[in-house]
Amino acid sequence: MRVALDAMGADAGIDPVVQGAAQASREHGPLEITLVGDEASIARALESEPHDASRIHIVHAPHYVRMHDKPGEALDDRPKCSILTAARLVAEQQADALVSAGNTGAVILAASRTFERLQGVRRVGLAAVYPTMQAHGPHGDPFALILDVGATLHCSADDLCAFAVMGSAYSRIISDIERPRVGLLSNGTEPTKGTPEIIEAHARLANSDAVAFAGNVEGLDIPRGTVDVIVCDGFVGNIVLKMLEGVSEVAKELARTAYGSGLRYKLGLGMLASGIRKIKDLTDWKSYGGAPIVGFDRTIIKAHGRSNARAIRNALKVAAKTVERKLADQIREGMEA
């Protein structure tokens, strides 16, 4: 599996990206990594990291898109930037998948300028995994999938149905769930609840064999993990994702505050310690690395902007798995159904 890794633009700079690539190169499995970015900086970062040089390559890109840049303007002004260069490598079949921890808008826009959308897909979706109380799949994964979380703010019924098919295909590949349960996020479980788009999508999915449709789900079902895939528009999905990240940060801050307080608070913290550790483990996005941008004819994994080496390594492994199990082909078959 050949993965083009955008080495530039992550919040913590180039070092954790290169470290993650170096770690992945030493693991077993047919994975080759092409690091795309400033050649001198990448080579310098690699010097201090044990790695398998036969499985890491460097392609120079003189520019990159920063997190605060406007994606369209940045790509227009820097046609040889790292994310566009990495996307071209995939489009030209010099790599099988694209991984980036950079500017999300730039990643999506670079893909849309370079790749084709799968037939029947009007809008691509940005997915994310989130922690749940209930385990999923034969391996007991503590995560479920939600999409869209920001690529398409306003969705038609067609878009929501396509997200259901694409999310189901990804969940089947990553979590080994034969028939992932798919739910539409709404303000009630009744088929008549929600926006006109949600009501229409519900009617279509309820009469389709393309996915295992579980009906509407509410906000309280998100942490419970009552379904394997939740479908919503990007406006709502992005709010949900940020809220879940905020819960994790609050839990950690409460633990720090209690630890520095008096004996009574420390005793209370001791009683809650196992629960706090569980929340920390559940919300640790580093363990899964990234999530897909689905709908294109190529594999794209978007890693968290704050990714450390472990998260990058896991994002590379996820990319390889989706290529190996032919995510695009499975989505194509689902759309046809």
Image (cartoon, rainbow, N blue to C red):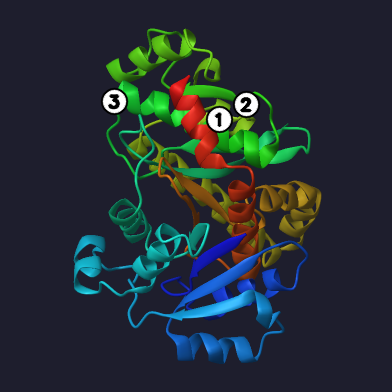
Amino acid residing under circle 2: Pro
Is 24 above or below relative to 152? below
Is 274 above or below relative to 6? above
Decide which of tag 3 and tag 1 comes sooner along the chain: 3
Decide which of tag 2 and tag 3 comes sooner along the chain: 3
Circle 3 sits on which residue? 156
Q: Are marks 3 and 1 in contact (CB under 8 Å)?
A: no
Asked whether 154 or 57 is in front, the reply is: 57
Question: Outermost residue toward the front?
Answer: 93
- Which residue is rendered at x = 78% and y = 33% of the image? 138
Amino acid residing under circle 3: Ser
Is 294 above or below relative to 31? above
Q: CA distance from mark 3 to mark 1?
A: 18 Å
Q: Is residue 10 left or right of residue 224?
A: left
The secondary structure type at the circle numbered 3 is loop
Q: Are marks 2 and 3 in contact (CB under 8 Å)?
A: no
Q: Is residue 152 left or right of residue 278?
A: left
Circle 1 sits on which residue? 168
> Alpha-carbon neighbours of circle 1 within 10 Å: few (<14), some, or many (≥20)?
many
* Figure quadrant of residue 263: bottom right
> Alpha-carbon neighbours of circle 3 within 10 Å: few (<14), some, or many (≥20)?
some
